[in-house]
Image: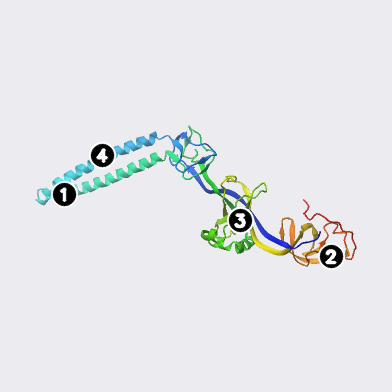
Amino acid sequence: MEVEARDIPIHLDMIGQTLGSVDIPIRARVDGVLEEIHFLEGREVEKDQLLYVIDPRPFESKVVEVEGHLAEARTRLAKADSDLQRIRPLAEMDAVSKQDLDAAVAQFEAAEGGLKAAEAQLEQARIQLGYTRISAPVDGLIGITKAKVGEYVGRSPNPVVLNVVSQTDPIRVRFSINEREYLRFSRKFSHEVRDARTRQAENGGGLILILSDGSMHDHLGEIISFDAAIDPATGTLTLEADFPNPERIVLPGQFARVRGTIEERTDAIAVPQRAVIETQGIFQIVVVGEDNTVDLRRVEMGPRIEGEWIVESGLRDGERIALEGLQRLRPGMTVVPKTGEAAPRS
């Protein structure tokens, strides 16, 4: 084949897994029998939409009980206030002892504290009653319920997490890169890695999402978060990127590749990897001259890109190289060249 200089982007591919940009577990915050389900599994739900109802009767009775305690506390406070109002003028006239006045003041203050405690208990009982109606915390996609109507929920070993609501637009991809890749990646996306808040204004994204079937997602993504340090156990850094997903094509839990262009080589020469002979770290390419004689030329190789290998030096634009029969060719040999396929073998 005749090599040709061209502009070649250098990609860095990273394996990741998709998840919702927000994944919120739906928990039963009180225990009881699940009475109602108000959604279709695997469908969109809206924020504050009712999802589950747990039997409210035990909590309603608790509210009534605490309301009775509150009424008693108010009665005690009213009596303590009346006693204090009666004793205070008598104490000023020395008709009763100071000790009686102090006792009346103490009873009044204790009644005030009892009323506040009863009011707090009523508020707590009403909060517990409110927990029997579980609503969607955000707009998103809800999954398959972990409990059915009639099951007792909210206390281990019964289901506590009933479901998960995920925001899938944008879809988030979590991936890891090793230390060497991080250095290359951060030089290109340094502003995104340093400050996620300004990444859109500075770069506008640029990451490509490649799905498991090899197709590319229609929308570019951007880095939104990352670990503070490289994990010493694995030698990798975890990053997360968001990709717009208005059609809801990508779902949480899928495996995907994130591709970032870290360099653009201009007038670069790339050859099929099968055209390179490697011997103890020395790279050679069989060059066929204009007179069809063979020359075994030493070259310096660069990055590999999708079946091709960039030649850093030792090969010029327009030269012809051999793709087949490399082991049989010797320097100075004359050949009858035939045009071959540049694509790498499968």
- Disc 2 is placed on an element classified as strand
For label 3, the residue is 207
- Residue beneath the point at 32% across and 45% down: 120
Please state which of residues 273 and 103 is positioned toward the viewer in this rendering: 273
> Mark 2 or mark 1: which comes first in sequence?
1
Please state which of residues 204 and 282 is positioned toward the viewer in this rendering: 204
Q: Nearer the viewer, mark 2 or mark 1?
A: 2
For label 2, the residue is 296
For label 4, the residue is 72
- Disc 3 is placed on an element classified as loop
- Residue beneath the point at 19% across and 49% down: 105
For label 1, the residue is 101
> Mark 1 or mark 3: which comes first in sequence?
1
Looking at the image, residue 204 sits to the left or right of residue 104; the answer is right
Q: Would you say the residues marked 4 and 1 are in contact, meaning their CB atoms lie under 8 Å apart?
A: no
- Residue beneath the point at 54% across and 48% down: 169
Identify the amino acid type marked 3: Leu
> Mark 4 or mark 1: which comes first in sequence?
4
